[in-house]
Image (cartoon, rainbow, N blue to C red):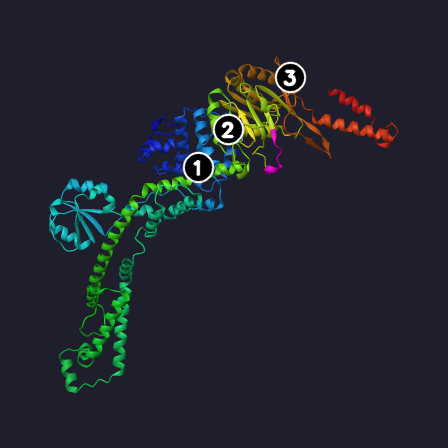
Amino acid sequence: MDLESIPGVGEKTVRALSELDDPERALRAGDVAAIATAPGITQGRAARIARGAIRLEHDDPGDFLATDRAREVYRQVLSLLKERTVTEYAAERLETVYPSSQRSRIVEVQEFASEALEREPDPAILEALEGVEPLRESGDVRVRERCLATTDAERYSEARQAVPELSVEVVEDAQGLAELARGYATVIALDESFAGVTLEGDVQVRPDALENPAEVVPERPLSFFAQNRDRLQAAVEVHRAAGLEPSCDLEALEDGLSRLAEDGTVAGDEELDRLTTAVDDLDAAASAAESVANDRLREAIREQDVTIEGSDLLSLVERGAGVDSLLSRELADDYAAAVEAARDHLVDALDLDQGEAEIARRAFSDEPTFPVERDEDAVGRLREELTAVRERRAGRLKRELAADLADQRKGARDLVRDALELDVELAISRFAREYDCTMPEFVDSEAREQTAESSKTASPSRGSSEAASRLPSSRDDGETANMSDDAVGFAIEGGRSPLLDEPLEAIEPVDYGVAGVTLLSGVNSGGKTSTLDLVASVVVLAHMGLPVPAERVRLRRFDDLHYHAKSQGTLDAGAFESTVREFADLAEGGEGSLVIVDELESITEPGASAKIIAGILEALSENGATAVFVSHMADEIREMADFEVTVDGIEAVGLVDGELEVNRSPVKDHLARSTPELIVEKLATESRETADTNGGTATATDGATDPLFYDRLLEKFE
């Protein structure tokens, strides 16, 4: 895949994508999480890039949604899907699912959606998904207690590039190594020439160190796992709750994570914890030991009478002696006991082993002083020893843990990706279940065989008791079900518009099918616009490759969707001209188009509107497009058209308590009665009933109107 050919991808983005391990795989798979790991690319940007790559892969012009209203319907149904995601990733990933005219793309998503419909959105899975996020790359890791050493300048440059986490030092000989060993806990010599040299400290000769940097800097992989501990653990829980086949050994991964602290250090090792605590508490413990010695010594002085002969005192003063000499002479045993107590306290407080204890005891001298003070040099040596031992043990444990986790890294990535992709599938499954969806059937000749095969394996998710496919439908009691494959534009059975702000059970199912060009008539507030929204949402979802909210749907594969919403008032001359030009372009090249128009007559005065609409319908009919025009002027348009225009009607059964009672499914080849006609008919009926009650007459004095007046008005509608 030529990255520069992806729509919306420039040179800078190409350079960023090139840093991915396998950019082509990520782009072809729409792997938003992987793409978002490229430098400077956000998750939202990654979704747009993935969408562009998919378009390129399927040679998709990306212009299926041809009007603002069509795009608005797409955003509305997409929002319904995104609302049913748990993770931000899944919401962004759904942005890569868009309506397409390309058969290959539709089939690709249908296969994915068919598998998604098999998923049960168990609450335990959804809860576990709340902790899953795309993995973060570890930031800059800097290790200060370890360094690399070499005598070669070229090797030096290579080491700095391969292992930026460590300092790299140039030395001339073994003496240089020895000096480094006094400043670092571990020195790793890269030159073979140092083999066999014995030096104090932890000096390792490893000429192959740059071949496997993770062994030299285990902090690198450990940092990755430490930053992603919670995300990985959540992904593990998702796999267990959903029964997914894991891409790695879950127990081994959990064991490794349990031994890893949040800061990337090894956790759970008692000896390492002891050494770490000893280093951290050394100063406090030394101060406490001083206090122990001084408290003991003060108490001894208080309890003991010290007698000094005058000649002895004079002698001591002449020699410049002070309190220390007096302590040495008179309180030598007490001082020794106090110092020993200080030493014991320091050893016990830090839980030192025998070798460490010998160093610790040097922190308090046998020479009497008051107050007793620690020897800072001895404390410093103890700190160096403890730190060196700690770092050596930590390094070994890190290497062991890094080795255990190294083989899990790719599997861990796949584990999280699979959990995130499951959220995408569950969103589709939840949408399908909540809106009682089924997979649509495309009937154009090239897609018919593939779609029929897909429909056999797709579960419409109408609850666990209805998991089997519902295509083809067993219903054949309506016009839509009996349309031939060659004639069908779209045929919807039991459809419920997801765009209605009503509970699903409150929405009356609609059956409607159109082949060719059709006018849709009906009473005000009878459901004409919601029927158009149903058709648009079904067509958009079908061309996204997703299930649709209906019992059964059959449709052709359209090149584009032109949905024109009802105009708000008459257009001015410029806007009117623009609208007519748009329909002129559509009439010339709209053979594979679906055109949905809501009351186009509102763009100008009624007489002119009927003529213009009739002309547009003629052109669309000649071009082989599929079109539904809602109009209150169906009769006038039909008279002006030079071909037999099909007129369907959403029929009002009548008025009940002042409210329309409507059959929401359009009746084929039927011009629906208008609301005014129904009201006049209601008034005529009531007037006749009043006249019958009054003995066949009606007068102005009794508040009744002559039924003949209403009958005369009704005749005008015939």
Query: In this figure, which residue is indicated by the disc labeled 1?
Result: 92
Above or below 127: residue 623 = above
Residue highlighted by disc 3: 638
> The N terminus is located in which quarter?
top left
SS category of the residue bearing label 3? helix
Sequence-first tag of 1 and 3? 1
Figure check: 651 above or below 637: below
Judging by the rendered image, the residue that carries numbered circle 2 is: 542
Q: Is residue 428 left or right of residue 2?
A: right
Q: Which mark is residue 115?
A: none
Instruction: Judge from the rendering whether residue 57 lies leftward or rightward of residue 588; answer left or right.
Output: left
Q: Amino acid at mark 1?
A: Glu
- Front: mark 2 or 1: 2
Q: What span is in magenta?
A: 502-510
Q: Does the rendering let one see residue 471?
A: yes
Label 2 sits on what residue type? Ala
List x then y, in percent, for residue 140.
Answer: 30, 45
Q: Residue at x 70, y 27 (%)?
A: 675
Q: Is residue 505 magenta?
A: yes
The part of the image, by quadrant, that contains residue 305 is: bottom left
SS of the residue under disc 2 = helix
| Residue 452 percent location from the top left of the image | 49, 26
Q: Residue drawn 15% across and 84% down?
A: 312
Q: Residues within 10 Å of mark 1 (few under 14, many from 20)?
A: many
Residue 54 occupies which quadrant of the picture?
Answer: top left
Earlier residue among tags 3 and 2? 2
